[in-house]
Image (cartoon, coloured by chain):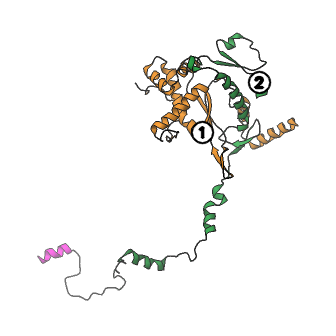
Chain colours: A orange, B green
Amino acid sequence: MSSATLPRIGVTIGHVAQKLKTGGIEPSRRARLEVLRRIVTRCVREERVELKWNRAVEARPYLERLIQLGVERGPLDEYTAEMMEWWLPERDLIVKMHEVIVPRFAEIQSPYTSLYRLPPKRLQQFIQNKREFWKRYDIGILEIDKNPFPPVLSENSAKNEESPNLLNLLLTDALKNNLEK
Amino acid sequence: MLEKLLWILGRRPPLDFALATVPQAAVARPRITYESVKEMIEDFSVVLGVPKYRTSKPKKVTRKFSFSRLLQPIDNLVTCPSCSNIHPSDSICDKCYEKVRSVTNEIKKKMMEYNPYVGDKQDKEIFVKFKGEEIEKDEVVNGKRVIELEKRATELV
């Protein structure tokens, strides 16, 4: 059984696969899959996670396909069951997948996940010989849609973003500052 | 036999003795060839321009690691329409997201209060109830797992 008959997932695919490293396993295809599996499992458990941007981009199609398998084929399908078992090694998450996440998207087209990017953040790693070591992180927020959390992008911000005009932005900011005073 | 030869040669000067002068410029000069690479380099050193003085260390270092090489301007900054925070245009506003994150973490803490090793499951949708809120209709909850937060919605956001 293959997934050839499934419709295409609604997220960007086809970027160059990265060598994702993890402790304990030498960087390889297997280590990469292990990292991806951890991310997918965590995503299903927590529904919204913050990851390094490149990892979030890598893992998103896999998560998307897993949800799509559940939506299109259902829990009784052999291939779906196999995939669920591999990607979600914890039994309670398979139950969550079929009983909570898949019914949400029963009548909805892909994409079932969202990905947002945070501005790069510098975080201190360690101090050696009174020298501070900082590292720059690109952070992505990967989430399964229709989760119980407050939306990442509020309706207010989406409405205001329609005008890219600098003058409009400055005027609204000035107005707001005046009102605050 | 001779006729045939003439036919082959076509319109040529007659086969006869004559004075032939060859212009001096047309003589193909022999191409410059070198015996070895060293010989070539030695010859070229006369032709090519070479630095007269050694480039100093500070000049080299500045060329490689000057501020314009290490620091690059960010030219895609935009203002967040709701909180006026400045952030790159390809990312969301981190200041706004901090509030969302705090609420998310509060809900997550409650959401994760289950033990999968004794058979607990997340088998229901989640309905979030902030402190002071009252559920008006049971249809809204309708079999969902209710998570009660200890803070009001206004406190968190």
> What residue occupies the far bottom of the structure in this picture?
B19
Identified at 61% across, 26% down, the residue is A46
Identified at 65% across, 22% down, the residue is B111
* Segment tinted magenta in the rendering: B1-19
Read off the chain for label 1.
A
Q: As rendered, which of A153 and B141 lies closer to the eye?
A: B141
Read off the chain for label 2.
B
Q: Is residue A164 magenta?
A: no
- What's the residue type where badge 1 is placed? Lys
Q: Is residue B10 magenta?
A: yes
Which quadrant is the N terminus of chain A positioned in? top left
Identified at 18% across, 72% down, the residue is B8
Discs 1 and 2 share one subunit: no
Q: As rendered, which of B13 and A5 lies closer to the eye?
A: A5
- What's the residue type where badge 2 is placed? Ala
Q: At which x and y percent is residue A64? A: 53, 28
> What residue occupies the far right of the structure in this picture?
A181
Label annotation for residue A52: 1
* Residue marked by disc 2: B153
Q: At which x and y percent is residue A112? A: 57, 27
Q: Mark 2 falls on what kind of element?
A: helix
